[in-house]
Amino acid sequence: MSILDHIEFSDLRVFVTILRTGSFKAAAIQLGLTPSATSHAMKRLEERLATQLLYRSSRAISPTAAGSELAARLEQGFEQIGAALSQLDSSAAGSLGELRINVFADAAHLLIEPAIPEFVRQCPKVRLTIVVDDKPIDIVSEGYDAGIRYGHYVPEGMVTAPLTRAHRWVAAAAPAYLDRHGRPLTLQDLQQHTCLQLLLGDNSSYQWEFGRGKHRQRIRVPGLVTINNTAATIAAAKAGVGIAYLLEGRISKEIEEGSLETILEEWAAPSEPFHMYYSSRRHAHPALRKLIDIIRLQHGLSRLR
């Protein structure tokens, strides 16, 4: 029986992701695990290999010599696995095979949906697979060609291409709700209102952010309803359930038709642009640049140089 029979593939992924992100916590978020599960996976891997792979301190982690060598070989292996998966059945899909993109829900709605018709026109032989997933994942080991995230959520070591300009996060409510409960005029006023809680992909509750620069604030708001889906949050806000915290671009239609109104406009918080990202160790799919350019042009940016 080889040593490979004793090793969990998922534990190897945890190890590589820890080194790629620089911390147990960041790796746990990216893999959709708890910090405890990430720590147990590393302990299990080191015990089964009978080798220390990481140096741990209160400030940082770093690979041992054995860990560094193993990580380099694993990265190559994950790249080969990802390439093999992306090329599976490529003959049936056409000469350019399949382009697989992992994207979170808001970006799918704002970027991918409008781009699909033009992409199909320009790349008729490409099988485009879009997987909508709000949980952060390791796109390399999961076999994706690229992913879309906010710039500050892109893992280190990835090639990135901005797709949009900066966005704004705003608080918004239905006119009926504001008529019943009044319009908040200060951030402190939110404590007297019902707010729709935002649940992130890693199942953590998101603190609402307001303002910019030195005036930027993160506050916890009251409310008994928690939702991890933007469409459901918008529906609840339109129904007058409470105040929602949303990307302004995501509710442009609702604002225009008057079913939602933004509040505390002077406190709207800027957000980093959406970015397409892919592994620096991997040749980008030939159709990926076309998709990037289509999205950039639709959002007022020039083609990539």
Image (cartoon, helix red, strand yellow):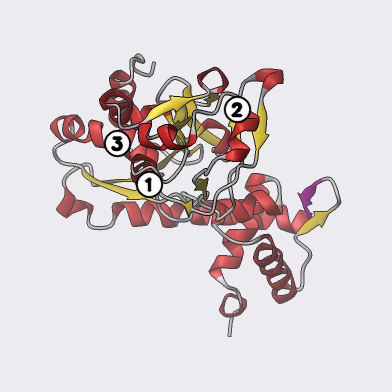
Q: Does the magenta stretch include residue 197?
A: no
Disc with the residue nearer the chain's start (2 vs 1): 2
Q: What element carries label 1?
A: helix
The answer to which quarter of the image holds residue 261 is: top left
Give the class, few, some or many, for how many residues have Cα within 10 Å of label 1's Cα (few <14, many ≥20): some
Give residue 49's position: percent from left, percent from top: 71, 72
User: Which residue is most to the right?
Assistant: 58
Residue type indicated by callout 2: Phe
Residue type indicated by callout 3: Ile
Q: Is residue 61 magenta?
A: yes
Give residue 260's position: percent from left, percent from top: 35, 31
Q: In which quarter of the image is the N terminus?
A: bottom right
Residue type indicated by callout 1: Ala
- Left or right of 109, for residue 274: right
Q: In this view, does 170 lie above or below 227?
A: above
Mark 3 touches mark 2? (CB < 8 Å):
no
Nearer the observer, 138 or 183: 183
Nearer the observer, 277 or 274: 274
Residue sitting at x 84%, y 45%: 59
Q: Name the residue under label 2.
A: 210
Give residue 156's position: percent from left, percent from top: 60, 38
Residue sitting at x 65%, y 49%: 26
> Residue 191, can we see it?
yes
Residues in magenta, as a range: 60-64
Main structural element of the magenta stretch: helix, strand or loop? strand
Q: Name the residue under label 1.
A: 236
Disc with the residue nearer the chain's start (3 vs 2): 3
Give the class, few, some or many, for how many residues have Cα within 10 Å of label 3's Cα (few <14, many ≥20): many
Q: Mark 3 points at which residue?
A: 112
Give residue 135's position: percent from left, percent from top: 48, 52
